[in-house]
Amino acid sequence: HQHGHPAVRATAVAFPNIALIKYWGKRDEALIIPQTSSLSLTLAVYPTTTTVTLAADGEQHQVLQDGAPMPQAASVKVARFLDHVGQLAGSSRGACVETSNAGPTGAGLASSASGFAALAAAAAAAYGLDLSSRDLSRLARRGSGSASRSIFGGFAVWNAGTDDLSSYAEPVSDAHVDAAMVLGIVNAGAKPISSRDAMRRTVETSPYNAPWVETNPTELALMRDALRRGDFTEVGEISERNALRMHAAMLGAVPPVRYLTAGSMALLDAVAELRRGGLEAYATMDAGPNVKTLCRSADAPAVRAALAAAAPGIEFVIAESGPGVAVSGP
Ligand code: 2P0
């Protein structure tokens, strides 16, 4: 790693991403090496903005979310992450982190992806590390797996790899699909079980984990080929079945992990109904009840209107393809 002069203070903005080929399950818990590769679309909504300021000698890390101390469990994760960045930079200085999410936190809308991508970029800059985007992706991965993908805009693929060096995300540079998502906010509250715990339980107890892992390379290859050919229909069909297969794997855990609710299922029906009416839309769901509907960018207003009519009382937000992480000065 290159050691520059510490910037002392840096701010970064990162956006969430939603996977079309999901990450679910780790091979190595400490390093966050996944069982499988994944592929996502970074969104242009709900950014996280994070400022890292190096503290005076001898001071501890301090973590503030929206100006208030972050809950203990989350702030311990952040402090451990800062220790790692400090080690890379050869520094034992503490830091103050100030972060805020424009969207809901911990609701399965990828706040940990935008959060650790922004933290990685801001902390690396504050501690004076000059990292390539690949190394920044590896660093973000150590905080939260999905954050490795939010370093990049548009479509990104996280190569599972087998160790710290080989597990990183990179842009899908040959995608020819103009896609957007319509986010259906079934419930913006925090999830009942963290994705970290839920994926561990899936790996350890679900008989469907093995087939989930075994089918990943083929599904990913089909997805990459469809993106290359600009075949939106194929991209959508693979995405929807991949989300359902991930949920099938976790439904097979003991005890079962179920994030989907009646509201989620109603939206799945509504999306299928749109397709029957000739509007191409496909659903994907993560570690929460919210349903994200993938569509062609040009169709997003029509998809939103149709879903809003089918599911009154649910808020729908159009999310176009968004940019990678950006660092600004102090
Ligand atoms: C994904 N999810 O690919 C999958 C699909 C949720 C469902 O990545 O333990 O917060 O911090 O690596 O990244 C959510 O898991 O988990 C996630 P950790 P993370 O987007």
Image: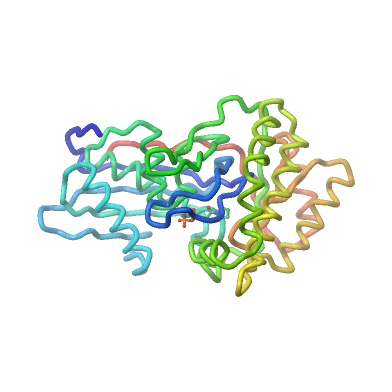
* Front-lying residue, 118 or 219: 219
How far from the left and from the top, in percent, is residue 20? 64, 44
* Front-lying residue, 99 or 286: 286
How far from the left and from the top, in percent, is residue 202? 57, 64
The colour mode here is rainbow
- Residue 172, compared with residue 254, is above or below; it is above
- Residue 18, compared with residue 199, is above or below; it is above
Quadrant hosting residue 154: top right
Q: Give the quarter of the figure containing the C terminus.
A: top left
- Is residue 252 toward the left or the right of residue 203 in the image? right
Q: Residue furthest bottom?
A: 255
Q: Give the quarter of the figure containing the N terminus.
A: top left
How far from the left and from the top, in percent, is residue 206? 62, 65
- Is residue 21 toward the left or the right of residue 198 in the image? right
* Front-lying residue, 169 or 127: 169
* Front-lying residue, 264 or 64: 264
Instruction: Identify the residue at horizontal 48%, vertical 62% (top origin).
Output: 196
Instruction: Identify the residue at horizontal 71%, vertical 27% (top origin).
Output: 230
Instruction: Identify the residue at horizontal 36%, vertical 36% (top origin).
Output: 135
- Is residue 298 toward the left or the right of residue 276 in the image? left
Instruction: Identify the residue at horizontal 41%, vertical 42% (top origin).
Output: 13
Q: Residue furthest right?
A: 277
How far from the left and from the top, in percent, is residue 276? 89, 47
Q: Count of labels shown? A: 0
- Residue 201, compared with residue 143, is above or below; it is below
